[in-house]
Image (cartoon, rainbow, N blue to C red):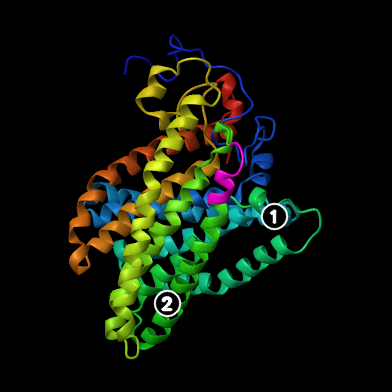
Amino acid sequence: MTGSPETDTTSSPETDTTSSPETDGRITSADGATLGSALEALDPAYFGFVMSTGIVSIAFFELAVPVVALPLAAFNVACYALLLALFAVRTAAFPRRTLADLRDRDRHWGTLTFIVATDTVGVQFLLFFDAVSVAAALWAATVVATPLLLYYLFATEVIGAGKADVSERIDGAFLLVIVCMQSLAVLGGLLAEPLAGYGNAVVLLSMSYFGSGYVLYVVVVTVVTYRLLDGAVRPDDWTGPYWIAMGAAAITTLAGATVGPLLGTVPGWEPYAPVVVGATFFAWAIASWWIPLLVVLDVWAFLTDGVEGRPPVWVLLFPWSRLGFGDRLHAYAPTAWGRVFPMGMYTAGTLNLAGIGAFGALSVVPTYWGWFALLVWAVTLVGTGRAVKRVLVGGGPAGDDRSTAT
């Protein structure tokens, strides 16, 4: 590159602003002054990091690139265990803050990342470590937790006075409902064969989540699209979770490609197998349609938000580099992982669909897209590392107080 992310301001100086493409759930430097305050403010959406790392490792497993897939899988399982420990301590030390997060309409949908992360780790235990019992235990835990959490979250959205309009309250994060349900279908479909004694029940439950998630996607994505089209959208309005509009369709593709072929071997379900496979292709087509628009909006936001005049060269070369680098243009927040998971999921979903008969030609798409997803994962990880460093060590560039600490 002709200029470094920290020093290249010759084209256009970075300016102090109060907004960026990633603003949700941020913690200021004052909030992160101590480990205790950082732990108290730990965003439930941080399980999105495990979701993203896990699906990228699974995607490269499907791409037959073990040199990437295996280290990421081991790293992700360790991070999942660490986050479980941190949130357990947080819940014990700050129970009121934990309950407040569940009541906060701006943050509580992020708790669904725990469900998706758990199912993603369960898939990793199956694919990488052949640990059926661990994967089954994780799936059982999410089968119990999912309806409890979903009905609670929907109840809090329905009950209460002084609510904002639906178009103001519903954003890309709401689509985590669909991702949550389809993650259960994916792991359940993979467990159907190893749990042969319970195969029919597992398939039935997986199909119920697949079908419900499919229908809900149509409903929710309509509201999300309306929000984007209704009124002005500023660069700082555009955040990572809007990528879940694509990611929810992508995980629906993966769920259908996982469960659909199983139906041909389950008594009573055989006639539905071609229907599910056909619906799965339509979900993939919807996910594919979203990608060019999401990329354009990402580029627009990163090139314009907080930038006066011409953006620095390093931003022009790779706009997503703002997630990991820069000073006053640093644009990282926990919600940034909301775009990485859909990128990895599109890779995995497309590869699994390509493995079904007539769809083999689709395999060329993820061969290239997977590496782009890995690159965005890497710069987002740098942003996470900087946030962690700020909590543990303190200091950092003056503009770093806009990044989010864990």
Q: Quadrant of residue 404?
A: top right
**Location of residue 320 with respect to 345 vertically, above or below:** above
Picture coordinates of residue 97, whole percent (x, y): 73, 51
Q: Which stretch is magenta?
A: 225-232
Q: What residue is disc 1 on?
A: 98
| Viewer-nearest residue: 313 or 201 | 313
Please name whichever residue, 202 or 218, is drawn nearer the observer in this view of the structure.
Answer: 218
Between 324 and 40, the one lying in front of the other is 324
Type of the residue with mark 1 = Thr
Farthest residue in the right direction?
161
Quadrant that contains the C terminus? top right
**Residue 98 higher or lower than 187, as above or below:** above
* Residue at image point 20% right, 50% down: 364
The answer to whether one can see residue 293 in this image is yes
Question: Circles 1 and 2: CB distance less than 8 Å?
Answer: no
Identify the image quadrant of residue 147: bottom right
Crowding at label 1, few (<14), some or many (≥20) Cα neighbours within 10 Å? many
Position of the N terminus by quadrant: top left
Q: Which residue is mark 2?
A: 207
Image coordinates for residue 146, horizontal then vertical, percent: 56, 69
Sooner in the amino-acid sequence: mark 1 or mark 2? 1
